[in-house]
Amino acid sequence: MWKYIKPYLPFAILAALFMIAEVSMDLLQPSIMQRIVDDGVLGANNNGVGDINLILRLGIIMICLVLFGGLCGSLNNVFVHKSGQNIGNLIRKDCFGKIMTFSFPQVDKFGTGSLVTRVTNDITQVQNFVATFVRGFIRTFLLTFGSIFFMFRLNTQFGIIVLCAFPIIVGVLALCLWKANPRFSKLQAHLDKINAVMQEDISGIRMIKACVREVYEKLRFNKANDDLIKTQLEVLVIFAFMNPIMNILMNAVVVLILLSGSYQINSGSGATPGNIMAGITYTTQLLNGILMLVMLFQNISRGYASWKRVREILHSQAQLTDGEFDGNTEIKGQIEFKDVSFSYPNSSVKILSNINLSIKQGETVAIMGATGCGKTSLVNLIARFYDVSEGSVLVDGVDVREYKQTALRDKIAVALQKSELFRGSIADNIAWGVTADIEQVKTASQIAQADDFISRMKDGYDTLVAERGMSLSGGQKQRIAIARAVLKNSEILIFDDSTSALDLTTEARLYEALRQSRSNSTKILIAQRIASVRSADRIVILENGTIGACGTHEDLLKSCKTYRDIYDSQMSEEAEKNG
C-alpha cells in the first residue's frame, strides 16, 4: 500500500500533527480544572479563601485550549480526508485499469459481482482503514498512554489503579477482536453474492418477467441478504457485549479512585478534591481511548480484510502478455490457422483440434456448424481473446502472440450476436472507440441498414439509448453494432452471428453494401442460415472442433452431407412457411 500512501504522505503527516495538538489540548484541561477547584474554588493554598480572578484566568485559558483543539481537530479531518480519499481514488483507478487487462478467464474467475464489490465497497473500507489509522491510532495512543502518564503525575496511587486494570481491559479487547476478525472476510464474500445476484437479475429482468420467476429471484436475493445480515449481527453482538464490559471495568476504576482519594484526604496524605476530579476526568479520557481502540481495531481488521481482496486484483498478472510487434505489415487482412488446437483454461476438453485454414485478403469466409462445435472459439483466437493451446494463429503473416494487443485489435472489428450497447446517444454508440463525424456515422449506418429506422426516430442520431440497449429491438441493436464495426474500417471484419435478428431481405442488402464498400476487408461470417452464407467465397463446416468440409455453396451441396442436410432442412422449412 506504500506506493499509494507515499504521494499523500505530507497530508497524512499534517493530519497526525494536528491530531497530536488536539489531544494535547484535551490532556492539559484536567490539570487546569484541578487548579480551578483546589485553588480557585476551595482556596487550598490560601487558607480556604477562593480566588475568582484565578478562576476567570484559568477558565479563559481552558476556553482558548478548547477552541485551539477544535481548530486542530477540524484541520486534522480535512487532511485525513484528503489523504484517505485520494489514496482510495488511486487504488480504484489502478484496480479498474488492471481489470481492463484481464483475459476472459480471469474475469470469470473473480466473477462480476465480486469485482464490483472489490472496486466499490472494499476500496471504501481501505479508505476508512487509512483514515482510521491516521486519525484514530494517534488519538487512541495519545489518549490512552497520555492519560496514564498524567494520572501518575497527578497521583501515584491513581496511576497504579489504572495500570492494574489496563491488562484486563486489553485482554477483553483482544478476545473480542479474535472472535470478530474471521467474520470480516465473510462479510465481504456475502456482499459479493448480493452484487452477483443484483447484476444477474437487473441485466436479465426481461427474462425473469417472461418466465414469471420474480418470486424465485426474490427468495434468492433474500437468502444472500439474510446471510450478510446474519454475519453482520454476529459481529455486532460481539461488540455489543464488549462495550458494557469495558464500561463496568472503567466504572470500577472510577470507584477505586474515589475510595483511594477519600482515604488519602482523610489521612492527609496529599490528595485533594481537585486531584480526584482530575483523576476521574483522566479515567474518562482513558475509557474514551480504549473504546476508540476497539473501533480502531475493528476498522483496521475490516480494512485489512478488504485490502487483501483488493490486492488480489492489483497483484494479478495479465494472462495474455503483450508482444512487441506494432502491426505495420505490407499484407493486410490475411489470416492463417496452423495446426491450431484449443481448450479453455482449466479444462482438458479440446474445443478445436488440428485446425488448418488460410484466409486471403478481401475474402469472405463463412463458418457454419452445430451449436457448441467451436465457431465462436475459432474467431476469438484471431483477436486473441484467448491463446491457442497448440499451433499458431497468424494475422498478416505474424503470430498474434507477437503483436501488441492494441495493434492487433486495431486491425479487427467485431460484431456479436448479443450486441453490447452503452448508455448514450445512438451516434455515440456507433462511433464508440473511434473518432468520426456525423457524416461518417451516417455512412456506416447506411451500410449496416440502420439509417432508415434511426432517421425515423424523433431525435435521430441523438436518440438516447437506455442501459444495455433496452429501448431498442434486437434487430435494431444488431444493426447499430454492425454500423460500429463498419465505421472502424478495419482490415478484418468478424460477424459472429450478428445478423440473426435480421430478416433475409435486410441481411442481403447489408452483405451487398459490405461487398461494395469494404471489398478489401477480409470478412468472416458465423451464421446458422444457408441464405446468410451462400454467397460467401468459401464456407467452412465445423464438426466437433475440426474442419469437416470447406468450399463454395455449390461445392458443398455436392460433396458435404452435413451441409446438404442443413440446406434441405432449411429449404423445406421455408417451403412450409410459403405454402
Image (cartoon, helix red, strand yellow):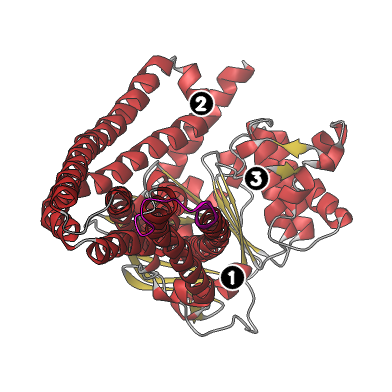
Mark 2 → mark 1, Cα distance in angstroms: 43 Å
Q: Amino acid at mark 2?
A: Ile
Residue at 55% of width from left, 41% of height from top? Answer: 418
Residue 108 locus on image (x, y percent): 36, 51
How crowded is the residue under tag 2: few (<14 C-alpha within 10 Å), some, or many (20+)?
some
| Mark 3 vs 2: CB contact within 8 A | no
Quadrant including the C terminus: top right
Magenta part, dominant SS: loop
Q: Position of residue 70 (x, y in %)?
A: 55, 56
The residue depicted at 39 percent of the width and 70 percent of the height is: 1
In the image, which disc is placed on residue 360? 1
Amino acid found under the numbered disc labelled 1? Lys
Tag 2 residue: 205
Q: Is residue 191 above or below residue 44?
A: above
Nearer-the-camera pick, 85 or 440:
85
Looking at the image, tell me whether mark 3 or mark 2 is earlier in sequence order.
Answer: 2
For this view, does 206 lie left or right of residue 274? right
Q: Could you tell me which residue is drawn at 79 percent across and 59 percent down? A: 517
Helix, strand or loop status at disc 3: loop
* Pointer 2 or 1: first along the chain: 2
**How dense is the environment of label 1, judged by Cα within 10 Å: few (below 14), some, or many (20 and up)?**
some
State which quadrant residue 151 falls in: bottom left
In the rendered image, which residue does mark 3 sit on? 422
- Distance from disc 1 to disc 3, alpha carbons, whole Å, reads 34 Å
Magenta span includes 141: no
- Residue 278 picture location, percent across and down: 32, 53
Front residue of 577 and 416: 416
Q: Tell whether position 53 is magenta.
A: yes
Q: Which residues are magenta?
A: 44-55
- Quadrant of the rendered structure where residue 422 is? top right
- The amino acid marked with disc number 3 is Phe
